[in-house]
């Protein structure tokens, strides 16, 4: 198939092109944008089997540019398709603003009406999406997306301005938008009446968005991962990370070092415990304790050693020999005192997961040699 994509270098266009190029290599993408030679539009309209009309104007210098960009170019595109009697399906990226009485909304509504008329006259399948606020990677900050602006500014330690934190926002995530557009391309659009829409929408206040994004920044200090079981939080967090400055991808961890080696907390979660990295020097034994409810998983990724267990009240000791040459997870059950000894000549590195974040008030850790 030949897929014409207008606005191919815009936010939605760039994400759509990236996905189609990766997952549908047999499609030919005819990319048209402001920098494209206008003469190519004629060729593209002759060859297209499907049109994604994503081009538009939303922040012009003059209000007259709204109608010129959102209505005028749509008219030009449709005239070009008519010239070659090309009645292939055409999708239009409109906006919920089309329902409002403002210059931008009026221009979007005019483009919608034009496309509906075109579909009736030419028998073309018309797919009009009134998108709410779209967010995700590659969205231009300080332009027309509050999420992009907040993510960019907070990630780069820049100030933000929130006039009314109680304003309710309707959001759609770019991956959900792209998935819907590909479904439309393959003949399965999500229709609601005469319009189409992205099935997955999220409702959240402006203030809640800001709180989440500030918590993402603080997570580097607290080590607390966001609640990624919440679909919106998961999408916001991914979006936030895409705005990190290129010299700010990494951050240091606090290493608790002594003559035995080191212990470093890596990640913490509110409901799935925490992950830490333990380094033991040659000949060193660590542990020698047991837990009532706290349980752990040990994974030696470098070096070699032994993990020993003894059930409370019994004398028999059980040994599990571990090595970075053969990755094997060892569960640390409750009610067993345990230790881990480095049997090698080099440092032994162990990834340790525990089912709860350490609480100094209730450590649930009792010293007892194995």
Image (cartoon, rainbow, N blue to C red):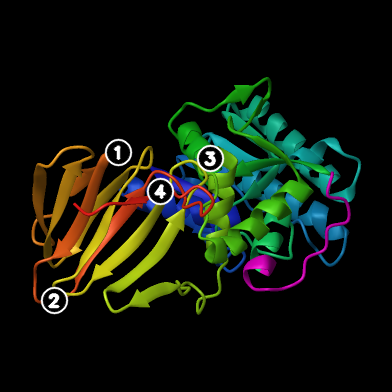
When the figure is inspected, residue 116 is found, relative to residue 32, above or below; the finding is above
Q: Is residue 26 left or right of residue 251?
A: left
Along the polypeptide, which appears first: circle 4 or circle 1?
4
Q: Which mark is residue 346?
A: 2
Precedes in sequence: disc 2 or disc 3 = 3
Q: Nearer the viewer, mark 4 or mark 1?
A: 1
User: Residue 309: image x %, image y %?
Assistant: 17, 46
Q: Earlier in the sequence, mark 1 or mark 2?
A: 1
Q: Give the mark toward the camera: 3 or 4.
A: 3
Q: Are marks 4 and 2 in contact (CB under 8 Å)?
A: no
Element class at badge 4 = helix
**Cα distance in 3D space between marks 4 and 1:** 50 Å
Q: Position of residue 106 (x, y in %)?
A: 85, 43
Residue 334 - label = 1
Q: Nearer the viewer, residue 70 or 207?
A: 207
Query: Does residue 285 appear left or right of residue 335 in this picture?
Result: left
- Within 10 angstroms of label 1, few (less than 14), some, or many (20 or more) residues? some
- The first of marks 1 and 3 along the sequence is 3
Taken as a whole, is the magenta stretch helix, strand or loop?
Answer: loop
| Residue 163 forms part of the magenta stretch | yes
| Disc 3 packing (10 Å; few <14; some 14–19; many ≥20) | some
């Amino acid at each position: 198939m030949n897929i014409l994509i207008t606005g191919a270098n815009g936010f939605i266009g760039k994400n759509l092109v990236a996905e189609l190029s990766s997952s549908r290599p047999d499609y030919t993408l005819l990319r048209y944008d402001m920098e494209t030679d206008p003469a190519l539009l004629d060729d593209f309209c002759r060859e297209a089997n499907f049109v994604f009309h994503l081009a538009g104007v939303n922040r012009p210098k003059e209000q007259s540019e709204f109608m010129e960009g959102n209505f005028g170019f749509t008219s030009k595109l449709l005239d070009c398709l008519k010239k070659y009697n090309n009645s292939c399906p055409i999708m239009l990226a409109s906006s919920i603003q089309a329902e409002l009485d403002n210059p931008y909304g009026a221009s979007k509504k005019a483009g919608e009406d034009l496309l509906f008329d075109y579909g009736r006259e030419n028998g073309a399948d018309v797919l009009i999406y009134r998108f709410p606020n779209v967010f995700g990677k590659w969205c231009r900050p300080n332009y027309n997306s509050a999420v992009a602006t907040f993510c960019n500014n907070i990630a780069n330690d820049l100030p933000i301005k929130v006039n009314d934190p109680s304003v309710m926002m309707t959001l759609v995530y770019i991956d959900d938008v792209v998935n819907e557009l590909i479904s439309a391309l393959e003949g399965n659009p999500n229709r609601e009446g005469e319009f189409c829409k992205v099935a997955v929408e999220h409702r959240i206040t402006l203030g809640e968005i800001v709180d989440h994004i500030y918590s993402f920044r603080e997570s580097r200090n607290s080590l607390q991962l966001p609640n990624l079981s919440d679909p919106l939080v998961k999408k916001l967090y991914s979006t936030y990370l895409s705005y990190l400055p290129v010299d700010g991808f990494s951050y240091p961890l606090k290493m608790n070092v002594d003559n035995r080696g080191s212990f470093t907390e890596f990640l913490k979660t509110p409901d799935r415990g925490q992950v830490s990295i333990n380094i033991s020097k040659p000949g060193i034994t660590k542990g020698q304790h047991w837990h009532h409810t706290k349980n752990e998983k040990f994974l030696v990724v470098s070096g070699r050693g032994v993990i020993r267990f003894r059930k409370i009240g019994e004398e028999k000791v059980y040994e599990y020999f571990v090595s970075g040459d053969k990755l094997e997870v060892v569960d640390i059950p409750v009610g067993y005192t345990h230790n881990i000894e480095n049997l090698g000549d080099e440092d032994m590195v162990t990834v340790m997961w525990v089912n709860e974040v350490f609480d100094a008030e209730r450590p649930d850790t009792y010293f007892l040699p194995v």
